[in-house]
Image: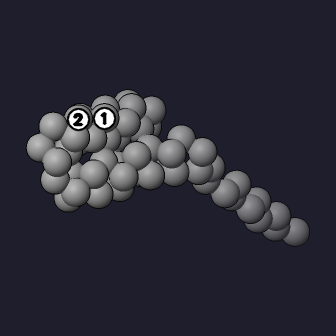
Amino acid sequence: MRHLITLGCLLVALGVYAVGMASGMAVFAGFGLLAEATFWFRLFHRKPAKASVTTR
C-alpha cells in the first residue's frame, strides 16, 4: 500500500506539471514540485528501527 501511495504522488506530480505547462500557471508548477518532493521523500525515507527493551 505504501508504494501505491508513492506512485500516486509521482502520477499527480506529472499530471500537475502537464497542466502547468499547458496553461502557463506557476501555481501548478509549485504543486507539481510539492508532489514530486513528496514522492522522493516517501521513496527513500526509512522508518527508524524500534529499540528493543530488555528486561532483567
Residue type indicated by callout 1: Leu
- Using residue 38 as the reference point, say whether residue 46 is left or right of it: right
Q: Measuring from the top left, give residue 36's x and y in whole percent.
A: 40, 46
Q: Residue at x 81, y 67 (%)?
A: 55
Asked whether residue 12 appears in the rendered view, the answer is no
In the figure, 16 relative to 37: above or below? Answer: above
Q: Measuring from the top left, give residue 11's x and y in whole percent.
A: 31, 32
In the figure, 41 relative to 53: above or below? Answer: above
Residue pushed farthest right? Answer: 56
Q: Is mark 1 on a helix, strand or loop?
A: helix
Q: Residue at x 39, y 32 (%)?
A: 7
- Residue bearing the label numbered 2: 18
- Using residue 8 as the reference point, say whether residue 45 is left or right of it: right
Quadrant of the rendering where the C terminus is positioned: bottom right
| Front residue (pair 5, 1) | 5
Q: Which residue is drawn at 20% across and 45% down?
A: 20
- Residue bearing the label numbered 1: 14
Quadrant of the rendering where the N terminus is positioned: top left
The residues bearing labels 1 and 2 have C-alpha atoms spaced at a distance of 6 Å
Asked whether residue 18 appears in the rendered view, the answer is yes
| Front residue (pair 47, 16) | 16
Residue type indicated by callout 2: Ala
Q: Measuring from the top left, give residue 42's x and y in whole percent.
A: 49, 47
Are the residues tagged 1 and 2 within 8 Å (C-beta)?
yes
In the figure, 13 relative to 51: above or below? Answer: above
